[in-house]
Amino acid sequence: MIDTDKNYDVIVVGGGHNGLVCASYLAKDGRKVLVLEANDSLGGASATDEFSEQFLVSSCAHWLFQLNPTVASDMGLTQHGLELAARDLSTIALAEDGNHLTINGDTLEGADISDEDRKAFVAFNKQILKFCKLLAGAFNRRAPKLVEGNLTDRITVAKLGLGMKMLGKEDMSDLMRLALINIYDVMEENFDNDLLKGAISLDSLLGSHMGPRSPNTVYGYIYRRMGTVFGFNGPAVVQGGMGAVGKAMAKAAESTGVDIEVGVAVSKINVDVDRTTGVTLADGRVINASLVVSNADPKTTFTKLVGLGNIETGVARRVKTMRMKGDAAKLHIALDSLPSFNGLTEQQMGQRLVIAPTMNYIETAFNASKYGEYSKAPAMDISIPSIHDASLAPEGKHVMSVIVQYAPYELEGGWDDDKKDAFKQLVIDRIADFAPDLKDKIVASELLTPVDLEERFHIHGGHWHHGEISLDQILMMRPFPGTSQYGTSVDGLYLCGAGNHPGGGVMGLAGHNAAIEIIKRGKSA
Amino acid sequence: MMPHDETMILETPFHSRCLALCEINLWEDWKGYRSAAAYTSVEQEYFAVRSNTGVFDISPMIKYRFTGPDAGAYLNRLVTRDISKIAIDRVAYTVWCDDKGHVMDDGTIFHLAENDYRLCAYARCLDWLMWSAEGFDVTIVDETAEVAALAVQGPTSCAVFKDMGFEGIENLKPFGITRYPFGGSEVMISRTGFTGDLGYEIWIDPSLAEDFWDALFAAGKLRGIRPIGSSALDMLRTETGFLQAGVDFIPAEEAIRTGRSRSPFELGLGWLVSFDKPVFNGQSAVKRKERGLTLCFCLP
């Protein structure tokens, strides 16, 4: 509720998970905080929606695997109702012949996996975990600036540098070498099994505009595996869908005194000379506050809300050139009953299923999107959450949620109903290659292209990371050089979304770090 | 005018007249145009401006035109001065900065009509102007070749114009703009210049350039009119204390060595900076510098 008598200290634009995290920390610091959310539900891309009568699905992110434990415990998310229906799930790489590969932690089962691959996988995991731990030291704090480093920044840099040195000679040179090459080459160096190489490659690029041979995919993989450091040994299914994360966070925020208003769109972040004064709502109301924190992605924040004319040319150019074009679609299927996947038990169907039989399969799928076409044989990440959480569908019925790569944001000629139908059919056909009775069980289905995701979640380009996670857009270069450490060129305007260090995924650290930075700056914020 | 593939150096619309008067044949390259460094003797040209009337061909000066509903707001973000205070038919001298608050160039902005401005600059900067246009509804055109221009400077310049039939020219205030019919079209006259003396700049369609020159020199004959070259102009502007980009300061974009570019305050041009208007390029950096948080040392 907007309390018009209250003089808010801080307005948070957007009630995504990072916005709620940030609001919560700021309120705990004693500030009067108002969160404004355009949609009717909270959590941003961590959402649950009813896509067909009585069928609910996590409509953007569908696994929880990176939520930062400090954020979760500081906010008391468990006490506020966050419940996992299943956790530490395996990933099953599907094979057309039914000889699938099951990946769980360090262990590999099926697909005639060799002992060499098993051993190599343990060693690979060990090394990746080392890299993750090293990075984790820089994730829960602001990224240092490249120059003019103050003591805090220098400590972060020193920790990173020392951490790298402490990796030992071999791991250190490996990190420096691997970070700059691509996951395809790393897989070829380490493993023989195609399903294994495909599954790991898929993890390195989900949500991005990259193929296995693209640079930055190794960082993408390490980034995804950060969840391991945060206590996730595989993805988790949230009871009630990912929207429950937003709900718990909203309750946690409200318990610290945050006012939250949903269904209220901000049309403008007001700027007087070079300082923000508050926001203007879509209905014309003006709410003043000395600080505005934008949970919207950097492009939306600067282009639509602030206006490029209110920032300097250099910054405007960087906003413009920041890379954030989504390439992943979401397919939601309401099922009359559980389909049968070749070679999978019901318990196995509840795991994370991926269709990425070989790295070349993914790369070929990516080729299409480079030229504005959708993949003819897409790669997929499939979840059937209703196996763990019966509340998502009527009794005995199920929902399936699929992340589909690649569906380019800028499809040649644009997305229309015909193209969406054709693509949806193609994806369903492809899944049916592994689950032959799937089509007989479909009650309803919904395809969300990046354009739909953009519209529904107000994310420019429909890119769920709010900007490509790549070496040129991380740390002090995230969202772009000159605007890091959560502050912007507009005094009093801060960013707290996934477009900032450390990045996207339902992690909560961007919101956490932004709040810490604002609190630290105190009156000068 | 010869096309680019036949000659590197272009000729101005007044070239035939300049050529005829350039007795010592001393030419130089001014941003791609052939321009006289001196016609006869630098001293004589200098004194023409101080005592009579000197005419300097400023056609090569880079000229950009800005039109569209956001033209004013656009320029206000581009330059350091508050453009909203520049009325129609007025001219303002200003500088513009990069994001580091370093001066890229200086020049004059002519408010020609509602949502219609001209910027005269030392250096070409269309890329920067276009980049800065993101988010504004403004059309930017390089009209350097489409406008012929002369600086007519010196104590008798007003009298010469009166003799040409430009009635009421004596009422034109410094930095004002007025227009007179000429040759079936129009000549625009602004009371601006680079010499510190009484003087004007005229802006005309290139097709009328030679006719205007002839009429001007005919009218000024008895008032000691004389063409001047860049060497004399350099003396005049130095004497007056006007800065020359590329000479007195290194435009930020051209600076190669770090520390060579300068903020408006470091150039003594702080009076051109308005901190009360909406954000402009370099604002935060200039403000930081002005507050003295960045130290500059000058070693003898």
Image: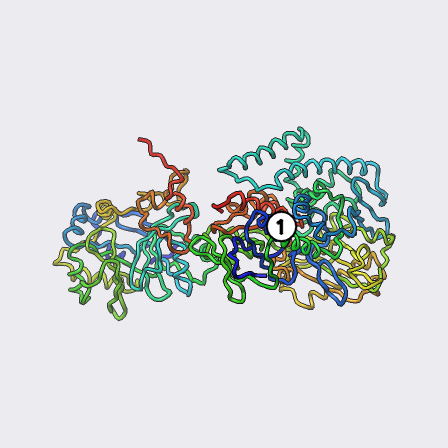
Question: Considering the image in quadrants, where does the N terminus of chain B appear?
Answer: bottom left
Whether residue A196 is visible here, answered yes or no, is yes
Asked if residue B51 is positioned above or below residue B163 in the image, the reply reads: above
Across and down, in percent, residue B178 comes to 25, 65
User: How are the colours assigned in the image?
Assistant: rainbow
Q: Which quarter of the figure has residue B162?
A: bottom left
Across and down, in percent, residue A397 comes to 83, 63
- Quickly name the residue at label 1: A21
Q: Chain of mark 1?
A: A
Across and down, in percent, residue B104 comes to 38, 48
Is A217 displayed left or right of B40 in the figure?
A: right
Q: How many marks?
A: 1
Depth order, front residue of B250/A507: A507
The amino acid marked with disc number 1 is Val
Depth order, front residue of A264/B245: A264
Residue at far left of view: B222
Asked if residue B131 is positioned above or below residue B178 in the image, the reply reads: above
Asked if residue A149 is positioned above or below residue B51 in the image, the reply reads: above
Neighbour class for label 1 at 10 Å: few (<14), some, many (≥20)?
Answer: many
Q: Residue at x 78, y 52 (%)?
A: A85
